[in-house]
Amino acid sequence: MAKIHTKFHKLMLIGILLIATIFTTAPQIGHAASTTETYKVNASSLNVRTGPSTSYKVSFALKKNSTVTKISTSGNWFKIKSGSKTGYASSKYLTKVKATTVATASTPKVTTYFYVTEPTGLTIRSGASVSYKSLGTIPAEKKVQILSENKNGWIRITYNKKTGWINANSKYGFKSTKSFSYKIEEDDGTTYYLIMQGNSLNVRKLPNTAAPSLGKIGNGYTAKILRSASNGWVEIQYSNSVKGWVSTNTELTVVTDSIGQVGDDLEGSLTGLTFVIDAGHGNGDSGASGRDLKGNLVYEKTLNLKAAQAIQTAIQNIGGKVLMTRTNDTFLTLDQRAKYAIGKNANAFISVHHNSASSSAVGYETYYSNKTSSKAFAKAVHEGVIEAVQEEYPQVKDRQLKAMDYYVVRYNSVYASLLELGFVSNPTELSRLNTNKFRNTVAEGVVNGLLEFYGR
């Protein structure tokens, strides 16, 4: 009887072990994820269902780039959580988000602020990367205190009672231990100008010396004032795509509603203004070419330089300063031309060219980049030139002001335009283009346009 009892216990033990083995080795549906994982929806819309197949009812849908937390896996389906909702979604429409280790965040040793300079503002997110959901936006020119900083450059802040993360890249703002504030003064409808009468002054991202410098302006620099701050700083269009702030709390600057009030009477004068005149092409790069009515071969590079020199003389004759990208038959890259104005306190850039197409093509046209703020400048120059030219040569066709991202106007640091004075491919037009009379007429028109644009 004792032996039977022992055998019975052995059989029971074996049975229990078999059952345990079955349960531990059998495939499990919906096993929990060992760690929390974040995924992003890569489809335009993703249905989330009540179970792990398309036969289950749709519970809710998610938009593209929505982020979810993975709870468990069931074959090719994930059980996910989005906000307070849970459900199942096909794993092929979910992309794993690389985790950002918030644990790397550190707290500044001294109170530090971040000033937003991005014109469109900065998005606050729930985590330290763009994969996290948006909590709102911090507008441009606002200040927030840095609570902590992640190694990837994102900072944790609080704005409008919302705590989250923003990208603190220097493209979007700057850090400072100095706290400052200012108010933008109301516009009274009067146009004011800033005129430099000293050697050098910084243009900054915001109206305070704590803000990074964008560059410097020097003696004679003139600019229209866009906004004024309560602390004595003014905003100007520093380049064709960048605005900046200059202090008027110094004897180096004068603010006036009439440029002619400063120094000599500047009405009808370009005194205090500096222009870069760019003769297109040069040396081995001849540009277009054509034959005139006498059969002479003429290269565009030669016409460009002669026309640029005529414009130079006309501007200098009424007090303006001219910087030439080339004065002889030399070659410059497009990048060299576009960057020529940097650091030279120039107000504007004009590139001189001649066109080529069919033998019947005629006319003058002006180009600007619509990715910059140069349209009004280019328009003034265009209207000045076409008015002067058509008065002397009524047959010249106005081919209008046009937007085109030519390198020298798109990537310039100042107001920029490109002039196409006419077609070298048309023998009749080429014969007119290659005369001092025509070049001087164009130069007169350019000056008239500049006087109009600068309110002289």
Image (cartoon, rainbow, N blue to C red):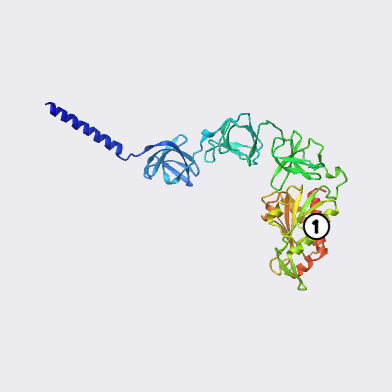
Q: Position of residue 396 (x, y in %)?
A: 77, 64
Dividing the picture into quarters, in which one does residue 368 lie? bottom right
Q: Residue at x 66, y 37 (%)?
A: 141
Position above or below: 98 against 362: above
Q: In the picture shown, does residue 94 fall above or below 399?
A: above
Write the residue at 54% across / 39% down. Answer: 129
Residue 414: image x %, image y %? 73, 49
For badge 1, the amino acid type reads Ile
Q: Label 1's element?
A: helix
Could you say which is closer to the camera, residue 380 or residue 165? Answer: 165
Quick one: 156 or 68, which is closer to the camera? 156
Other residues around mark 1 within 10 Å, as few (<14) / some (14–19) / many (≥20): many
Left or right of 418? Residue 32 is left
Which residue is labeled 1 in the image? 311
x and y, in percent, of residue 115 in the image: 65, 35
Taking depth in this image into account, of 148 and 78 the one nearest to the observer is 148
Q: Residue furthest right?
A: 264
Residue sitting at 78 percent across and 68 percent down?
Answer: 431
Residue at far bottom of view: 294
Q: Is residue 112 visible?
A: yes
Task: State whether residue 369 appears in this view.
Answer: no
Q: Position of residue 390 (x, y in %)?
A: 79, 61
Instruction: Please identify the quarter of the rendering in which residue 158 is found.
Output: top right
Q: Residue at x 46, y 34 (%)?
A: 84
